[in-house]
Image: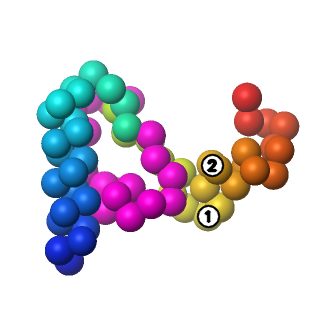
Amino acid sequence: MGPKYRAACHFLTILRDALPEAPILGDSTQAIYAGNLAYAAPAPNRWFNASTGYGALALLAEGDSSVQ
């Protein structure tokens, strides 16, 4: 893992430690890509991402009626 991904994972770890009950939700960003490789969520349902394909934001931008 390169230095940028290591830095992103370090950021996620700091965020997790500061807010252990908060879920992390992400889309197509470098931090989320890095987290997919190496992030250790503290509990189930604390990590969600849509960083594959078009991501969740594309659905919202297109006005997808299935997104509530």
Q: Sort mark 1 into few (<14), some (14-19) or many (20+) by Cα contacts within 10 Å.
A: few
The residue under the point 19% across, 63% down is 7
- The verdict on residue 56 being magenta is no
Q: For the magenta stretch, what is the residue range? A: 25-45
Q: Position of residue 24 (x, y in %)?
A: 37, 37
Name of the residue lying farthest toward the top = 21
- The residue lying toward the viewer, choosing from 59 and 61, is 61
- Name the secondary structure under disc 2: helix
Q: Quadrant of residue 20?
A: top left
Residue 38 colored magenta? yes
- The dot on residue 53 is 1
Mark 2 crowd level (few <14, some 14–19, many ≥20, 10 Å Cα): some
Res 46 quadrant in image = top left
Above or below, 45 against 13 in this view is above
Identify the residue at the far bottom of this view: 2
Left or right: residue 26 versus residue 7 is right
Q: Residue at x 17, y 74 (%)?
A: 3
Tell me the kind of residue under disc 2.
Ala
Pointer 2: what residue? 56
Q: Residue drawn at (15%, 34%), measured in percent from left and top? A: 17
As drawn, 34 above or below 46: below
Q: Are marks 1 and 2 in contact (CB under 8 Å)?
A: no
- Callout 1 amino acid: Gly
Element under disc 1 = loop
